[in-house]
């Protein structure tokens, strides 16, 4: 198991950091209070720059989540958690779905624009709450001539209000399929952006479909069984795991900077043992989470038989650790940390989403247990 980054990978990660100068980072900080049009414009500009840097092609064609990709994702998530979530929903979920399961014509139509950052996509999975494990798919595509009429509803669709295309999971003659639906299509209604505790710079909404016409050429599937649905969920979990690393890094950096510069009793508060212990605890948790996330990515890349179980382990540990790290960072920042608009406060609000989105912590633990018992 080799977690040593090559010179090319190190240079690539530095290039990702360099894409965001102080002015662009300031603009990204304003996403928390931006409207849908502003979020879409910022996302498209960022996608274009990330596309030119090669970030949008990582793991796209082979569906793999290698260690180098996790490192790059961690950097973007530390720069802007909300931007990261929007970028990944478009590229690593919608894009991978097309790249792995799409027809040749679908790949030719969508992938070039996705890789160049000219198209925003998303995938709509959950219907009740955010779970797909215990809830059946009630979205149905009824064949009509050379097309389908799709009806159903989806909740918590990341990029829902700003996406150019939405891949909607549903049933086609009782088999799983994904219906590719263009924005403003007849019968598609996108709900208002949902108010949320965290990730306020990400546009999340419900969508509903009523006899929405979808040409047969815009259908992926049908599939026997639900394996593709599980794989898409795994991609979500990998993204949320990497996103948690970025959030922890973000919280650690602001806590460390504040501890070095803020004085109490005539000396920087980092000189106080209790503050130093908190920073040491944060760094220990961050380093441990990184190792587990990188191991999960390495096992997925190498095709290890226990890759799925370890991916769930990483999802649970990393996302729950993020809340702990953000809480300790807030404690170090004191009164300043409790005010809105700083990275630790935002990270504390964002952290809870990571635990309930994708495969929730509770369901992940069940899957880990099933894997240990050989039931998975």
Image: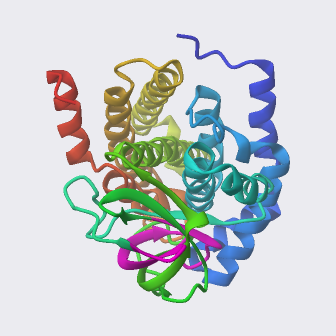
Q: Which residue lies furthest to the right in this view?
A: 52
Identified at 35% across, 78% down, the residue is: 152
Residue 206 placement: quadrant: bottom left
Tally the marks: 0
Pick whichever, 263 or 222, lies toward us: 222
Pick whichever, 127 or 51, lies toward us: 127
Identified at 38% across, 47% down, the residue is: 328
Segment tinted magenta in the rendering? 142-168
Is residue 129 located in the magenta-colored stretch of the structure? Answer: no
Would residue 200 be found to the left or right of residue 138 on screen?
right
Name the dominant secondary structure of the magenta segment. Answer: strand
Would residue 176 be found to the left or right of residue 261 on screen?
left
Identified at 82% across, 55% down, the residue is: 49
Q: In this view, does 281 lie above or below 234?
A: above
Would residue 319 be found to the left or right of residue 65 on screen?
left
Residue 62 placement: quadrant: top right
Identified at 54% across, 58% down, the residue is: 343
């Amino acid at each position: 198991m080799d977690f040593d980054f090559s010179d090319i990978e190190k240079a690539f990660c530095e290039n990702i950091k360099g894409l965001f100068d102080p002015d662009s980072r300031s603009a990204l900080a304003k996403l928390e209070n931006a409207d849908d049009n502003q979020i879409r414009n910022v996302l498209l500009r960022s996608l274009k720059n990330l596309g030119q840097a090669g970030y949008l092609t990582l793991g796209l064609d082979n569906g793999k989540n290698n260690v180098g990709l996790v490192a790059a994702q961690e950097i973007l998530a530390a720069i802007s958690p909300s931007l990261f979530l929007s970028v990944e929903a478009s590229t690593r979920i919608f894009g991978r779905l097309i790249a792995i399961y799409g027809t040749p014509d679908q790949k030719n139509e969508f992938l070039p624009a996705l890789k160049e950052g000219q198209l925003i996509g998303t995938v709509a999975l959950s219907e009740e709450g955010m779970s797909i494990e215990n809830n059946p798919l009630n979205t149905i595509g009824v064949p009509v001539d050379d097309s389908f009429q799709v009806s159903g509803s989806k909740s918590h669709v990341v990029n829902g209000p700003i996406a150019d295309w939405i891949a909607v999971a549903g049933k086609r003659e009782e088999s799983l399929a994904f219906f590719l639906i263009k924005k403003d299509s007849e019968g598609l209604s996108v709900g208002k952006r949902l108010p949320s505790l965290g990730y306020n710079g990400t546009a999340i909404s419900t969508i509903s479909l009523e006899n929405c016409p979808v040409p047969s050429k815009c259908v992926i599937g049908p599939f026997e069984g639900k394996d593709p649905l599980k794989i898409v969920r795994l991609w979500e979990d990998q993204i949320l795991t990497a996103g948690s690393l970025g959030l922890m890094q973000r919280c650690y950096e602001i806590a460390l900077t504040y501890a070095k510069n803020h004085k109490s009793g005539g000396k920087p508060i980092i000189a106080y043992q209790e503050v130093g212990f908190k920073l040491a605890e944060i760094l220990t948790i961050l380093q441990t989470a990184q190792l587990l996330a990188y191991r999960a990515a390495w096992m997925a890349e190498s095709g290890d038989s226990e890759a799925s179980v370890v991916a769930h382990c990483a999802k649970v540990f990393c996302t729950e650790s993020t809340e702990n790290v953000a809480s300790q960072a807030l404690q170090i920042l004191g009164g300043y940390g409790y005010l809105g608009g700083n990275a630790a406060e935002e990270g504390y609000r964002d952290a809870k989403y990571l635990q309930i989105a994708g495969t929730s912590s509770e369901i992940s633990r069940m899957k880990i247990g099933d894997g240990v018992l050989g039931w998975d």
